[in-house]
Amino acid sequence: MSSLSRSAAACQRILRPATARAFSSTPSLNFDKVGIIGLGLMGHGIAQTAATAAATKNLHSSVVAYESDKIFLDKGRDRIQSSIDKLVKKDKMTWSQADDVLNKIVFTTDRSALSDADFIVEAIIENMDLKKNLYSSLGKECKAGTIFASNTSSLSITEMALASGRPEKFVGVHFFNPVQIMKLVEVIRTEYTSMEVFDKTVAWVGDVGKVPVKCRDTPGFIVNRLLVPNLMQAILLLERGDATTHDIDISMQLGAGHPMGPLHLADYVGLDTCLYIMEGWVKDFPGEGAFVVPEILKQKVARGELGRKSGKGFYYWDGEKREDPVGMDEGVNME
Ligand SMILES: NC(=O)c1ccc[n+]([C@@H]2O[C@H](COP(=O)([O-])OP(=O)(O)OC[C@H]3O[C@@H](n4cnc5c(N)ncnc54)[C@H](O)[C@@H]3O)[C@@H](O)[C@H]2O)c1
């Protein structure tokens, strides 16, 4: 077999649609004890998702939820409690089921509780040095069979895998926000990930009720690789004065069927986050033409105009409510 057809066959193996597995009702019971590191926006949702599968499908004996600081541990627990309370109030769960879910989670600031976990999902802040330090320690502390999975949105899985000292047992599991609602999880493999580890991870994602898709370790994986350059192109349209904020957004809603326009979405995600992701890609992949950083994005972030969270970005915001475009599209002349 030529190296080209070998890679094509490998690609087919890796990229085979995984939806059938996602809807399987028989859990594969690959991971008895699961650990979650970091209980912020993403981690608390991932812990809740795993604990729900543990309580309702007997998928795991326990879910260890770890934060290094007690304040953030308590905050994570409160977030899970409040999310479960909402489900009970909406009649999607009884109080007794809610207790079962919470009882499956062991909240701890003691990292040694993770040492015998079968599968650990890491959702700490998006900082490569912090993540590499963590994985280098975990690689020494955890049993040989523990699989590590990073929820990073934009960092190299390969770099973290090598830092862990066990790259064959390292994958990416990219959940989407809000985790409790969003169905998709991108499962990422590097050139070192063993097929067995990858397949078990894909199966686990299906078992916890999500839809897994498979991707190689490439910048942005599938969704963000397509989405973030699209946001940048929308910002460049505005920067060049080719179209107004309103017209760019309404075009993608009414012409492409998107639920919100790209400038609205950039504000929603956070302009600092958009800038951070794209600057990282431009630095690491200077030859990739789709990766560009618009000047006005840099200027807005430097002025503290970060979108929804700061009250001003491409739009003004009143809390969660989007208001008028900033500057009412100054500088755009359609004559
Ligand atoms: N926010 C999103 O929409 C989103 C979507 C998909 C993936 N992600 C990725 O998920 C990860 C987490 O993002 P987030 O938005 O939940 O961040 P966050 O800031 O809300 O939460 C991070 C948590 O990690 C904790 N933490 C930091 N260092 C730690 C350490 N060494 N040990 C234990 N806990 C530690 C912090 O206390 C905090 O609670 C990032 O890699 C991010 O790229 C984020």
Image: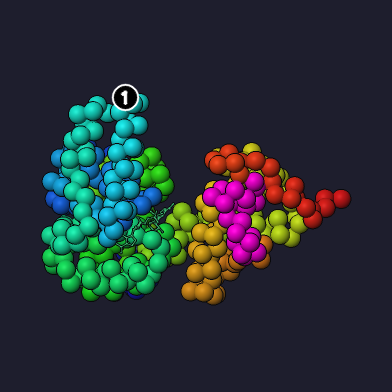
Identified by mark 1, the residue type is Asp
Location of residue 42 in the rendering, given as x and y in whole percent from the top left corner: 36, 50
Q: Is residue 141 left or right of residue 233?
A: left
User: Is residue 133 visible in the rendered structure shown here?
Assistant: yes
Location of residue 108 in the rendering, given as x and y in whole percent from the top left corner: 21, 54
Q: Is residue 275 above or below residue 254?
A: below
Q: Name the residue at 87% across, 50% down.
A: 335
**Nearest the eye: 287 or 182:** 182
Q: Quadrant of residue 232?
A: bottom right
**Nearest the eye: 131 or 204:** 131
Q: Which residues are magenta?
A: 298-316
Quarter of the image where ligand 1 sits: bottom left
Q: Quadrant of residue 230?
A: bottom right
Q: Is residue 44 left or right of residue 330?
A: left
Number of marks in picture: 1
Which element type, helix, strand or loop, lies under badge 1?
loop
Q: Is residue 53 left or right of residue 191?
A: left
Q: Is residue 74 above or below residue 274?
A: above
User: Is residue 21 visible in the rendered structure shown here?
Assistant: no
Badge 1: few (under 14), some or many (20 or more) residues near its Cα, within 10 Å?
few
**Nearest the eye: 135 or 7:** 135
Specify whether residue 310 is painted magenta: yes
**Nearest the eye: 121 or 168:** 121
Q: Quadrant of the N terminus?
A: bottom left
Q: Name the residue at 19% across, 59% down.
A: 110
Q: Identify the residue under disc 1.
A: 91
Q: Name the residue at 43% across, 63% down.
A: 154
Location of residue 70 in the rendering, given as x and y in whole percent from the top left corner: 27, 55
Q: Name the residue at 13% across, 50% down.
A: 32
Location of residue 283 in the rendering, given as x and y in whole percent from the top left corner: 52, 74
